[in-house]
Image (spheres, rainbow, N blue to C red):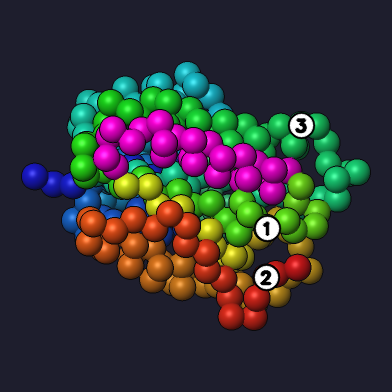
Amino acid sequence: MEKCALVTGSSSGLGLEITKSLIESGYTVFGGSRSGTEFEHENFYDVELDITSEESVEEFFETVREYTTKLDLIVNNAGICEMSPLSETTLEQFESHLATNTIGPFLLFKHIESFLIKNETHIISILSTAAQYGYPNVSAYNASKFGQLGLIESLKKEWVEHKIRFTNLLPGAIDTPLWDKMGSKFSRSKMLGISDFMSVFQFVVNAPSTIQFPELTFLHREGFLE
Ligand SMILES: NC(=O)c1ccc[n+]([C@@H]2O[C@H](COP(=O)([O-])OP(=O)(O)OC[C@H]3O[C@@H](n4cnc5c(N)ncnc54)[C@H](OP(=O)(O)O)[C@@H]3O)[C@@H](O)[C@H]2O)c1
């Protein structure tokens, strides 16, 4: 039987590349995002999803359930990042980071339990070095990713009986559209390329099912981007 994967944030950057790569490896992929993508494939279902809205998450899973009741792979990827000193960060900006990067994964996991396959499902979360390491001028992002890591660490223990795998990827900066609005202060040549990220992602996905990666941190050889 074909393998099914779910990818949040499939319209851009890492999520779009992950989607294409999984389809190439034979998965049927259910992608979720607000804007969707022009990418089309018979094994790709591009489903509308606003991860910050429980109603939208419920509707998303109703659509997925029309095609499958089991998910072999779940890629928790959707996220936002804006940069500003704390004094210039509005309450709305701070709350929108928490809504997307922390509450979003909470809603995803809350509604996904019935799709898990005992001894099989692998949940891969695209966190960030910012889930463990503080950077200046991204307090909202840092707080939201630290929060997401805490959420996952609790869930791992709560869902022990499902015997599923949890892998947390903590990459450093990657040259994706996420950086388009952040100005030119940061040199893209000191960021990982999407292909660098994908080589790690594919290694993790293709690893034997006896292995999980509780925390895989990787970054550009030049070090942290600050
Ligand atoms: N690029 C980096 O340097 C870097 C480094 C470490 C970790 N990461 C993490 O990697 C993940 C992907 O980032 P990226 O670099 O690929 O950024 P990106 O190109 O901006 O893509 C972000 C994706 O998240 C989706 N998204 C945002 N808000 C959403 C919402 N409310 N509901 C559903 N989907 C939403 C976007 O889709 P729509 O806008 O269409 O909804 C888009 O598909 C993020 O979690 C990010 O924190 C990135």
View extreme (left): residue: 1
Secondary element under disc 2, as helix, strand or loop, is: loop
Q: Nearer the viewer, residue 130 or 20?
A: 130
Secondary element under disc 3, as helix, strand or loop, is: helix
Tell me the residue that label 1 is attached to: 133
Using the image, determine if residue 130 lies above or below residue 65: below
Which one is closest to the eye, mark 1 or mark 3?
A: 1
Please state, as top left, top right, bottom left or bottom right, where the C terminus lies in the image: bottom right
Residue 162 occupies quadrant:
top left
Tell me the residue that label 2 is attached to: 224
Q: Earlier in the sequence, mark 2 or mark 3?
A: 3
Mark 2 residue CB less than 8 A from any atom of ligand 1: no
Circle 3 Cα neighbour tier, 10 Å, few/some/many (<14 / 14–19 / ≥20): few
- Residue drawn at x 21%, y 42% is 119
Disc 2/disc 1 C-alpha distance (Å) = 10 Å
- Residue drawn at x 27%, y 40% is 163
Amino acid residing under circle 3: Glu
Give the extent of the magenta segment.
140-164
Q: Nearer the viewer, residue 208 or 7?
A: 208
Q: Which mark is residue 72?
A: none
* Dominant secondary structure of the residues highlighted in magenta in the image: helix
Tell me the residue that label 3 is attached to: 92
Amino acid residing under circle 2: Phe
Q: Is residue 38 visible?
A: no
